[in-house]
Image (tube, rainbow, N blue to C red):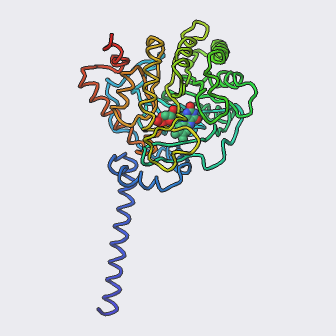
Amino acid sequence: MNPEGWTLFMKQVRDVGIIVSGGTVCFSCISLYEGNEKFYKQFIMPAVQLLNPETAHRIGVALAKYHVFQKPKTPDPPILKTKVWGHEFRNPIGLAAGFDKHGEAVDGILKMGFGFLEVGSITPKPQPGQVKPRVFRLKEDHAIINRYGFNSDGHKVVYQRLVDRIQKDKIKEPGILGVNLGKNKTSLDAADDYVQGVRLFGQLADFLVINISSPNTSGLRDLQAKANLENLISKVVIERNQLKCEKKPPLLIKLSPDLTEQDKVDIAEVVTNEKCLVEGLIISNTTVSRSENLKSEHQTETGGLSGEPIKHLSTLVLRDMYRLTQGKIPIIGVGGISSGKDAYEKIKAGACLVELYTAMAYEGPVVVTKIKRELVELLEADGYTSIADAVGADHKKKT
Ligand SMILES: Cc1cc2nc3c(=O)[nH]c(=O)nc-3n(C[C@H](O)[C@H](O)[C@H](O)COP(=O)(O)O)c2cc1C
């Protein structure tokens, strides 16, 4: 080939290269934005897994914050609508606490198709949490171990962020927002930390969560013991009842999956007692237990285990607590949900709403659309016309 022919050939190769890579980038962006399930599974999530888990988490929050993920194309079908605490949920799938710890990406998350979300856990004063590394992927087990230890921007900063969202950004559809409260590591009066949270966030949250079950703050889980729980709940209930706002938010207690049989009986007794009556339970947080079946090398890391390995354990506690409280207290079921079947199992065991976190870290936001689609199929196959009809169905069968 003469030099001119060679130059022309190279130019054509370059043009084809530009077109192919440009096309690939465009296709990737469109697929990312449109929530193409296959594309996430085959390309996006394997690439995400190459990143350090905490970096991947930070990037996920940033992408949600800047609304990189598109709204699902079709609205949720009526069968998924449900009413709890007077709030109309467009679907029962929420994002669990721990993803948007600092309330940075509320609207981007709601846009992914969740029916609600929890921000937090938030501590009164800002604190850095534990030293890094503090999050581990157990890939073979579809699980995570985390020991973040309540890294938090603190009440003041997060509160302002949530206020700005409504006042400055003038959000038209604010969605349903839960605020999950934690306590500072060095606090000497745990109950007071929660009381402060109720006072501040009670004015803007649709529900408040008293998180006394994270395993990474020393002594926190002791607050689930009967006398401590009575003391704590009576104080937060009084504070909530004194709020000046029009709609006082329901109070929910988030429980550990590592409760003994006696713990469950005691907690049920406390939360159904007139003085300590709470409006909801969240079951469950992460576990400190490690099943023999875990395969990943990270299984010995200290921290709370979430995802697939805690699914049955958390459903068991949920089922027990529904029975012990006679279905009188709405329960949010969380732990290992990654399919419509998982969500349906928790609903039939007694959950009126469900949440997830770990499945999103493995499958991306498309997991929400998948779960909703599968849940609709399962409800319809069993002849249900609403979520509410299926809540606690397992218990009704037995009686
Ligand atoms: C990385 C990570 C951080 C978490 N941080 C919190 C938290 O700050 N507060 C809380 O109540 N739960 C936290 N959780 C627990 C989740 O909200 C949820 O209860 C638990 O992970 C079980 O659900 P999953 O199996 O769908 O992840 C965290 C979970 C993970 C994986």
As drawn, which residue projects farthest toward the bottom?
2
Q: Is residue 216 left or right of residue 50?
A: right
Quarter holding residue 29: bottom left
Rendered location of residue 119, percent (x, y): 56, 33
- Residue 42: horizontal and vertical position, in percent? 35, 53
In the depicted view, which residue is nearer to us: 221 or 292?
Answer: 292
Residue 171 visible (yes or no) = no
Q: Is residue 124 above or below residue 294?
A: above
Residue 255 screen position, x and y as percent: 54, 25
Q: Quadrant of the C terminus?
A: top left
Residue 132, percent from left and from top? 63, 49
Give the residue drawn at x 35%, y 86%: 7
Q: Residue at x 46, y 53 (%)?
A: 49
Query: Taking 232 as reference, is 34 left or right?
Result: left
Kindly give the residue lying farthest to the front in the view shown: 292
Q: Nearer the viewer, residue 351 or 160?
A: 351
